């Protein structure tokens, strides 16, 4: 089970990093984004039909038992960061798919234009302005959310390295050292 979780983690992290780094590379960025979407969809199916350990409750923080003396090692901190990553990555993928409208994977919407709108001769001008404003907003939201994702990932990695180093090593496939007595 844990090896499957590590493989999922590695796949999602790799695709997300590559998608972020290829933000200006058009079709490559879009395909990587759809790859992230596929991994998220598979993860949701796994959460719904898999064992309890991989359920969505892993992302909901419980602050019960959080005190000053365990503030940095309490599971709620890690879960808050994971929830921030999950919400950010779903929002980034959603805005990316909304902007692309399936063009990168050959599923572009077929637009239906009414006769009066098509006949007025200004269809392209009006449609272009409407889409330009929408895409401008989506593009800005997509970029903002990608930066928020990067912030949450940075905090997540920092937290694990500082306070949960064995778990951090385990998740990135670093061999665990065995103690010799």
Image (cartoon, rainbow, N blue to C red):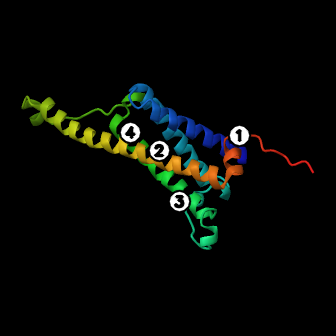
With 66 as the anchor, is 178 left or right in this view? right
Q: Position of residue 46 (x, y in %)?
A: 61, 49
Is residue 146 placed above or below 58 in the rendered structure? above
Q: Position of residue 135 (x, y in %)?
A: 27, 38
Residue at the left extreme of this rendering:
120
Q: Residue at left 22%, top 37%?
A: 131
Left or right: 15, with 27 as reference point: right
Decide if residue 66 is in sight here. Answer: no
**Contact between labelled residues 1 and 3, with CB atoms less than 8 Å apart:** no
**Residues marked 4 and 3 touching at CB (< 8 Å):** no
Q: Which residue is mark 3?
A: 80
- Alpha-carbon distance for marks 4 and 3? 24 Å
Q: Are marks 1 and 4 in contact (CB under 8 Å)?
A: no
Tell me the SS state at disc 1: loop
Q: Nearer the viewer, mark 4 or mark 3?
A: 3
Q: Which mark is residue 96?
A: 4
Q: Distance between the Cα atoms at labels 2 and 4?
A: 16 Å
Which residue position is annotated with label 2?
150
Distance of label 3 from label 2 (alpha carbons): 15 Å
């Amino acid at each position: 089970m844990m090896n499957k979780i590590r493989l999922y983690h590695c796949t999602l992290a790799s695709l997300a990093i590559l998608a972020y780094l290829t933000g200006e590379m058009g079709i490559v960025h879009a395909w990587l984004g759809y790859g992230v979407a596929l991994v998220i969809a598979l993860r949701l199916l796994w959460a719904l039909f898999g064992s309890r350990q991989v359920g969505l409750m892993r992302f909901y923080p419980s602050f019960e038992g959080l005190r000053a003396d365990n503030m940095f090692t309490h599971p709620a901190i890690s879960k808050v960061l994971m929830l921030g990553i999950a919400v950010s990555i779903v929002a980034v993928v959603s805005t990316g798919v909304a902007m692309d409208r399936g063009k990168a994977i050959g599923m572009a919407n077929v637009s239906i234009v009414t006769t009066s709108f098509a006949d007025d001769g200004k269809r392209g001008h009006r449609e272009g302005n409407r889409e330009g404003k929408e895409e401008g907003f989506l593009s800005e939201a997509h970029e903002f959310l990608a930066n928020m994702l990067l912030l949450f990932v940075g905090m997540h990695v920092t937290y694990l390295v500082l306070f949960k180093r064995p778990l951090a090593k385990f998740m990135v496939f670093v061999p665990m050292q065995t103690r010799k007595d």
